[in-house]
């Protein structure tokens, strides 16, 4: 074979054939390894790749739920998430409602319906923030009033 008379198309086809031959030889070696493992009793992986989840390396680049693209996670959470009320909004609503109620006071259930907040949130507010305010008094079981200084 005279190498000086080979054109580029012949050289390309020769490259493709040798690459195909190498891939077939690799595949045959894998099959032989599987046969040896079956007869020898040792389990050998069919592919060279490791199986399983790769180890985490530091903080992930994109935020989102695992197994989901980041764009979809943002859309799903944006639809569910409510905007938070500014700090002190609940206090203003509760104090205003108690001022309207007067000396009789108001039950937590009625108060929560009036201001549009869950009962549990109002109970927690009275036990934490409400206990720090001296003008708010507990009148009965689940009933509170505000002492308006005249």
Image (cartoon, rainbow, N blue to C red):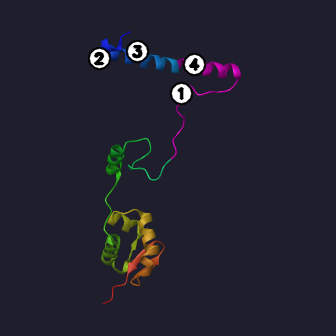
Q: Which residue is mark 2?
A: 8
Q: Which residue is mark 1?
A: 47
Residues 41 and 129: in front is 41
Q: Mark 2 vs mark 4: which is more N-terminal?
A: 2
Q: Mark 4 vs mark 3: which is more N-terminal?
A: 3
Residues 32 and 142: in front is 32
Query: In the structure shown, which secondary structural element does the residue marked by tag 3 occupy?
Result: helix
Mark 1 and 4 residues: CB-CB less than 8 Å, in contact?
no
Q: Which residue is mark 4?
A: 31
Q: Which residue is mark 3?
A: 17
> Residue at coordinates 40% horizontally, 62% vertically from top-left?
118
- Whole-angstrom CA distance, mark 3 to mark 1, is 23 Å
Residue 31 part of the magenta-drawn span = yes
Mark 3 and 1 residues: CB-CB less than 8 Å, in contact?
no
Nearer to us: label 4 or label 3:
3
Q: Position of residue 100 (x, y in %)?
A: 30, 76
> Residue at coordinates 40% horizontally, 42% vertically from top-left?
68
Return the residue found at the far bottom. Answer: 150
> Residue at coordinates 30% horizontally, 11% vertically from top-left?
5
The region drawn magenta spans: 27-55
């Amino acid at each position: 074979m005279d190498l000086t008379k080979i054109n580029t198309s012949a050289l390309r086809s020769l490259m493709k054939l040798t690459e195909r031959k190498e891939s077939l030889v690799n595949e045959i070696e894998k099959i032989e390894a599987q046969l040896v493992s079956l007869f020898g009793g040792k389990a050998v992986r069919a592919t060279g790749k490791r199986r399983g989840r790769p180890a985490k390396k530091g903080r992930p680049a994109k935020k989102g739920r695992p197994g989901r693209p980041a764009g979809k996670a943002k859309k799903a959470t944006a639809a569910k998430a409510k905007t938070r009320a500014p700090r002190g909004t609940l206090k203003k609503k509760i104090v205003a409602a108690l001022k309207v109620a007067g000396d009789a006071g108001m039950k937590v259930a009625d108060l929560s319906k009036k201001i549009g907040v869950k009962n549990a949130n109002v109970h927690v507010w009275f036990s934490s923030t409400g206990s720090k305010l001296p003008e708010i008094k507990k009148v009965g079981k689940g009933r509170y009033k505000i002492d308006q200084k005249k």
